[in-house]
Image (cartoon, grey):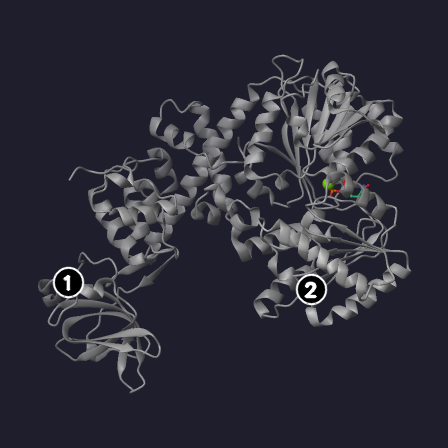
Amino acid sequence: MATLSLNTSIEKIPFISTSWRQKLSILNILTVEDLLYHFPSRYDDFSQFKKIVDLLIGETVTIRGQITEIKTKRAWRRRMSITEIYVADDTGTIKAVWFNFVGPLKYAKKDSFVQLSGKTSISKSNELQFQHPNFEIISQKKLLLEEAVSTNSTSTGSIVSIYPETKGLTSFWLRKNIKRILDILEVEESLPKELLKELKFPLLEDALWSIHFPENSTESALAKKRFAFEKMFLFQLKALSVKANWDKNKAPKVKFKKKLIKDFVKSLPFVLTDAQKKSAWQIIQDLEKTTPMNRLLEGDVGSGKTVVATLAILSVISNKFQAALLAPTEVLAVQHYEGISKLLHKLGFKGALLTGSQGRIGQEKISKLKLTKKIALGEVAFVIGTHAILQDNVKFKKLALLNIDEQHRFGVKQRAKLQQGALEIKDGLKTKIPHLLTMTATPIPRTLSLALFGNLDLSIIDEYPKGRKKIITKVISSNNREAVYRFIKQEIAKKRQAFFVYPLVEESSKISQVKAAKTELENLKNGPFADYNLGLLHGKVKPKEKELTMEKFKAKEFDILIATSVVEVGIDIPNASVMVIEGAERFGLAQLHQFRGRVGRGAHQSYCFLITSNNAPSSTKRLHIMEKTNDGFLIAQEDMKLRGPGQFMGITQSGIPDITMESLADTKTIQLARTMAQEFLKNDPLLKKSPSLKKRVDNITASVHLE
Ligand code: ADP
Ligand code: MG
């Protein structure tokens, strides 16, 4: 058979049948490379061989012998089949038992020579046995050798890889076929040889063998390190190339108007935190350059990103350019519009609101058609809205800043589009593109940001405005709901307001979310809160109505706002002091933290109740982290530990492989990869000297954050 290379398609491998190929393709394994980069999640060490007579209870071990008897029984009541095989060597006999197992057992016959690997235990009848050991038929010759020799076996007698559980794809099958592939594979090294030498990493070919069939744990660990580094290195090469491309663009130079900005800051009703000042200063300096800014402003909920964005907008419009601010929802866009335009209108700047359902200039309604004309003529200084701003018919005369709020709330694909949007936005500045400022409340540690957003500059607001009180958080069993209701009534008596969130998990079941919220509204209205004013907000409410509801809530016409996950995004109601989250156990901590951030935004002591009907210790333990801390970075870290960075970031579907995920937690690897990639590109910016490397870098399409 012809040799295989890493980019050979699975289809071309004769020993992989169509049905297996289909199973692989579900996992997105389409090429030899995909398959070989499907790494084990752990290993079983079966490298110890023993004679049957020497076996002890509970040891993990391999034996060799000959089958003396096979019994298959059906346990009808329990609907399963039981297979028992007796294996003998020259010192004794041992029984092995399997339930409902077919696999390689179907080839077992009396007198076959076999190798069994597993853990010994004691049966009910007090006999030493193996339950569900790994099992392979071997040739007689091997059996006769005294010492443990290497055989063709992949599941017994050695360190055996265990792959992540996936439908229909067994570790047994993977081991067997990966070995067959490795035997005939021609491997082209993917990392520069000098780099490997410097880092003392194994060559790709050796590393592939070591990670799937290690001889010892040092070997597999080193291979793993190499692959983690490799992924991160490629990722950084990609990020840096994307950045280099971005930097080729030109952007308008926005001068820093010192007096204007200082006066504005002085006029604010509060003093900026040092972190806000520092971030604003970084942004203002970026705006002064002719290379477009591409900066991520990261700050926990309530850390005060909006005012920093406002400073950037002011800087831009005072230079007679236009600025745009994009929010993920209508409610948030309107809120920003009202807050920001109040400040900027005072200084004589005209702003507009543009969403899917409405247009406004100042406080006046305007048709969207008229508004787009005014935008094109440069008659509005800043536009705040939803992604309606990015539609084709919206053309700016001289857009110098595109600011995207809560960028993590935009879908993975939308995000890519937003960056693209910045490039494509039609404006009168001809060859120039606007500066791009994205904001997120996901508190990602700096190094992790470097890994995920390696092409972006980063500003972090890592402190809260002074005087913010810790939100007192309590995990409450659903049986104790009444106590929460009583508490809320006390708060309402103090003229405070409360949120009730009923967030169902499934995205697809928006309708049932709506139903749940509606039902709950009725229950509360007809029950404990009959004498109170309740409002309802959910995803199916028309934007106008949503806005009205929010306004009413702000105006304290409602005591309680019942909502689906709509409230997650930066809604600002400083008077609300209680957040109740139903079904809290179904949420990631980072998400709960976002919900909680809706309260505690004013001067009042605020409270968050996490109501759960799941009292399992694992579930409550997680929730209790919320009681202990209000620090989003800490919560993010815990969440990441518990769920892995992929889940946590919502990027599991983005194709970043597990090993990269693991290495995301490894700051050293990230930093090393970054530095190495920078050095590497210095000598060969377009990767002309390393075509195979270039191909792999080009193939990174998973980097949704980069493009
Ligand atoms: P986020 O970072 O979550 O977007 P916001 O920008 O909405 O936070 O700010 C939250 C609240 O804190 C707002 O009411 C805002 O006016 C207020 N705020 C912002 N900066 C400060 C500050 N330095 N001191 C006091 N309050 C502030
Ligand atoms: Mg915000």
- Seen from the viewer's position, the closer of residues 135 and 49 is 135
Dot 1 and dot 2 residues touching (CB under 8 Å):
no
Structural crowding at the residue carrying mark 2, measured as other residues with C-alpha within 10 Å and reported as few (<14), some (14–19) or many (≥20): many
Ligand 2 visible in quadrant: top right
Identify the residue under disc 2. 611
In this rendering, position of residue 231 left or right of residue 14: right
Q: Residues within 10 Å of mark 1 (few under 14, many from 20)?
A: some
Callout in the foreground (1, 2): 2
Q: Earlier in the sequence, mark 1 or mark 2?
A: 1
Image point 15% across, 63% down: which residue?
A: 138
Q: Nearer the viewer, residue 566 or 47?
A: 566
Q: Position of residue 278 (x, y in %)?
A: 73, 35
Q: Which corner quadrant holds the N terminus?
A: top left
Give the answer, above or below, for where 475 lies relative to 238: below
Disc 2 element: strand
Can you identify the residue that label 1 sits on? 138
Spot occupied by residue 149 in the image (x, y as percentages of width and height): 17, 61
Q: Can residue 213 be seen from the camera position used here?
A: no
Question: x%, y% of residue 306?
Answer: 76, 37
The reply, left or right, for residue 169 in relation to residue 342 is left
Q: Amino acid at mark 1?
A: Ile
- Residue drawn at 61 percent across, 62 percent down: 622
Residue 685 sits above or below residue 623 on the image? above
For label 1, the SS is loop
* Mark 2 residue's CB less than 8 Å from ligand 1: no
